[in-house]
Image (cartoon, helix red, strand yellow):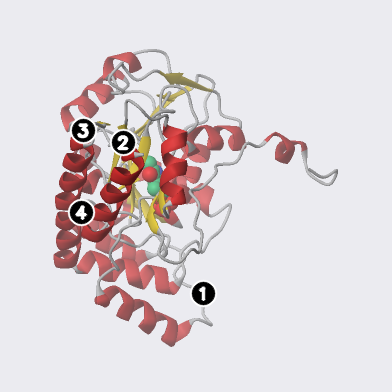
């Protein structure tokens, strides 16, 4: 608190990121990072870009990266926007597309950054409750709205909607922006990108942080009608013309080119997720069906906060949200095979006591 702050700064309720402590031997399953390093081709491309020309500004339009993403997803490069992590892409999206007289709609349980952006940009919003199974019911979004944003798969539940449900949402809301945040879609969801061609109001947001193991590089992107992309670009060029440095652009291009490493990484996570799901199930947990690189689970005998604290004592970090409806759940990132085994053996020790 300071008298030098603006009124806006006083009013902010910032997002609290998962902790990144430096503790030796820590099993870090709290921020949905990949347990694996990105492919060597990515590191080589980053090193080459850093060796070459750091004294020069990067391409402000990230043309080569947008062209690579366009080819990868079968869209045109003027239908692609890139930013410094999808959090920045989302921030520009809220500013450019989601502030209207009528409220923005999103679920009561979802990515906790959405209400933060609403606070930052003064966006009127209403939350729509998930059903009893913590699922999004698309029918509940058939009502007066200025815009809609959903994470699909949703966070932190991990539950996915199929593409038909997204199409139904678009049919119900043809005249307002609809944003689908697909941060976790590569782990078993169905992408809405094929719907972009017929829906000028649809924006799909993606990140390279999770399925491409590049959280440290900060690259996110959005795909949508070129008029939506133009709106995002107007906001971006009113804020920071160079959100992605040369190493980030080069590393992201190399990641897209190395599809083999990407597929291998995702396949390993899916196998480990199944081991984790089964292990938690055997230990009495209720585990929601996950299409993400994490599971959302609760134990009937343990409040979420107490279990998260007990795991932390044993150097296993998981994410707990002290929020209505989900306070007894833990969000646990799918780690390497060894990390999954450690999690389960530490849980055995805790549950036995
Ligand atoms: C992790 C996450 C993001 C942010 O990803 P970055 O690209 O690392 O900024 C956005 N949306 C959801 C739902 C996420 O879980």
- Is ligand 1 within 8 Å of the beta carbon of the residue shown at mark 3? no
Q: Residue at 23% x, 36% y: name it.
A: 283
- Tell me if residue 161 comes above or below residue 31 in the rendering: above
Could you say whether the residue bearing mark 2 is in a helix, strand or loop? strand
Q: Residues within 10 Å of mark 2 (few under 14, many from 20)?
A: many
Q: Which mark is residue 230?
A: none
Q: Residue at 45% x, 21% y: name it.
A: 127
Q: Residues within 10 Å of mark 1 (few under 14, many from 20)?
A: few
Residue on which the image places disc 1: 57
Residue on which the image places disc 3: 289
Pointer 4 with pointer 1, Cβ within 8 A = no
In front of the other: 66 or 346: 346
In front of the other: 70 or 13: 13
User: Does residue 116 appear to the left or right of 168 in the view shown?
Assistant: right
Disc 4 to disc 1, C-alpha distance = 36 Å
Disc 1 to disc 3, C-alpha distance = 45 Å
Residue on which the image places disc 2: 296
Residue on which the image places disc 4: 269
Mark 1 vs mark 3: which is more N-terminal? 1
């Amino acid at each position: 608190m300071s008298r030098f702050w603006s009124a806006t700064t006083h009013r902010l309720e910032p997002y609290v990121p998962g902790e990144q402590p430096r503790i030796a031997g820590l099993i870090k399953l709290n921020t949905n990072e990949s347990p694996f390093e990105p492919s060597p081709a990515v590191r080589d491309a980053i090193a080459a870009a850093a060796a070459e020309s750091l004294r020069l500004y990067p391409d402000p339009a990230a043309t080569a990266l947008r062209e690579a993403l366009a080819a990868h997803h079968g869209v045109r490069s003027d239908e692609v926007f890139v930013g410094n992590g999808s959090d920045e892409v989302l921030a520009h999206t809220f500013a450019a597309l989601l502030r209207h007289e009528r409220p923005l709609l999103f679920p009561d349980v979802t990515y906790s950054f959405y209400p933060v952006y609403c606070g930052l940009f003064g966006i009127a919003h209403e939350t729509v409750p998930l059903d009893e199974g913590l699922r999004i019911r698309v029918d509940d979004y058939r009502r007066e709205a200025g815009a809609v944003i959903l994470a699909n798969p949703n966070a932190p539940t991990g539950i996915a909607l199929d593409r038909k449900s997204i199409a139904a949402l678009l049919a119900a809301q043809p005249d307002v922006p609809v944003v689908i945040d697909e941060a976790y879609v590569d782990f078993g969801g169905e992408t809405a990108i094929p719907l972009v061609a017929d829906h000028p109001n649809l924006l799909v947001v993606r990140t390279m942080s999770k399925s491409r193991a590049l959280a440290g590089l900060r690259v996110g992107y959005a795909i949508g009608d070129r008029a939506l992309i133009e709106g995002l670009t107007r906001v971006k060029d009113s804020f920071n013309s160079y959100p992605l440095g040369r190493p980030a652009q080069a590393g992201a291009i190399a990641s897209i080119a190395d599809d083999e490493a990407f597929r291998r990484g995702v396949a390993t996570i899916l196998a480990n997720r199944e081991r984790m799901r089964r292990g938690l199930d055997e230990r009495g947990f209720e585990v929601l069906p996950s299409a993400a690189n994490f599971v959302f689970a609760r134990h009937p005998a343990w409040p979420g906060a107490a279990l998260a604290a007990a795991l932390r004592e044993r150097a296993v970090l998981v994410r707990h949200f002290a929020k209505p409806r989900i306070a007894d759940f833990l969000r646990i990132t799918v780690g390497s095979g060894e990390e999954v085994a450690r999690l389960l053996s530490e849980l055995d020790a805790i549950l036995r006591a």
